[in-house]
Image (cartoon, grey):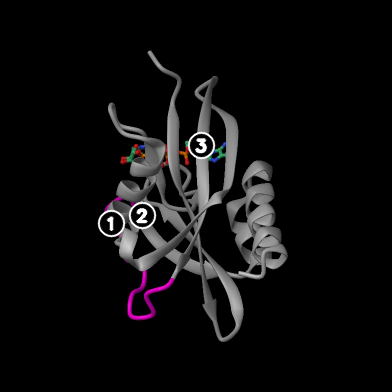
Amino acid sequence: MAPPRACGFVIFRRFFGQVEYLLMQTSYGIHHWTPPKGHVDPGETDLQTALRETEEEAGLSREDLKIFDNARQELVYNVNDKPKTVIYWLAELINRNKDARLSSEHQEFRWLCLQDACRLAGYEEMQNTLKYFDRYIVENEL
Ligand SMILES: Nc1ncnc2c1ncn2[C@@H]1O[C@H](COP(=O)(O)OP(=O)(O)OP(=O)(O)OP(=O)(O)OC[C@H]2O[C@@H](n3cnc4c(N)ncnc43)[C@H](O)[C@@H]2O)[C@@H](O)[C@H]1O
């Protein structure tokens, strides 16, 4: 069986001039916070997975987002003693009339500044990913 692989987007918005990141809290397990993401289904490309999961979990579609395909991060961590690969691209919420919404998989979502997002995300790799994208936004003047 192929090793577990999941894909999603680190989504940011500008709110009163501040960059804020979307994190969602699972309604299961230890209720950890992550950006919208999920497992790659057979026959899907990674980007198709990221788009599908983001729509399913956060209600945000391709048209609501600006995707930065050059801004990509790959994380590998152990789940049940097996390595899991998670790929994130950076995306901006450009539809000002739209907000995230919850599905049954999550119990809460928040838009957070980098510092608060890192605190809630917890895991070091996830924090590094958020910091990488934050630098990308500044360095590329997004
Ligand atoms: N405990 C549970 N009880 C009931 N239903 C469950 C369940 N776990 C999963 N499900 C079901 O599985 C489905 C999820 O499918 P998907 O929505 O397709 O997949 P996912 O986001 O990759 O799932 P998950 O939350 O498990 O992954 P993550 O890597 O963040 O998290 C996986 C583990 O890795 C840990 N983790 C997350 N990020 C990490 C990191 N950066 N470093 C180290 N560990 C990390 C998390 O704390 C977590 O323990 C849901 O529909 C849900 O119903």
**Mark 1 Cα within 10 Å, few/some/many (few <14, many 20+)?**
some
Across and down, in percent, residue 86 comes to 51, 36
Across and down, in percent, residue 65 comes to 40, 64
Q: Which residue is mark 3?
A: 86
Q: Is mark 3 within 8 Å of ligand 1?
A: yes
Magenta stretch, residue numbers = 94-106
Quadrant location, ligand no. 1? top left
What residue is drawn where x is 33% and y is 59%?
62
Q: Is the residue under label 2 in contact with that under label 1 (CB below 8 Å)?
A: yes
Reading the chain from its start, which is encountered first: label 1 or label 3? 3
Q: Classify mark 2: helix, strand or loop.
A: strand
Q: Is mark 1 within 8 Å of ligand 1?
A: no
Q: Main secondary structure of the magenta part?
A: loop
Q: Classify mark 1: helix, strand or loop.
A: loop
Q: Which residue is mark 1?
A: 103
Alpha carbons under labels 1 and 3: distance apart: 21 Å
**Mark 2 Cα within 10 Å, few/some/many (few <14, many 20+)?**
many
Alpha carbons under labels 1 and 2: distance apart: 6 Å
Across and down, in percent, residue 136 comes to 67, 59
Q: Is residue 133 left or right of residue 44?
A: right
Q: Which residue is mark 2?
A: 106
Q: Is residue 81 above or below residue 48?
A: above
Q: Amino acid at mark 1?
A: Ser
Name the one closer to the observer, 31 or 124: 124
**Mark 3 Cα within 10 Å, few/some/many (few <14, many 20+)?**
many
- Asked if the magenta segment contains residue 2, the reply would be no
Across and down, in percent, residue 134 comes to 66, 61
Q: Is residue 134 above or below residue 80?
A: below
What residue is drawn where x is 50% and y is 23%?
80
Q: Classify mark 3: helix, strand or loop.
A: strand
Q: Amino acid at mark 3?
A: Val
Residue depth check, mark 1 versus mark 3: number of the one nearer the observer: 3
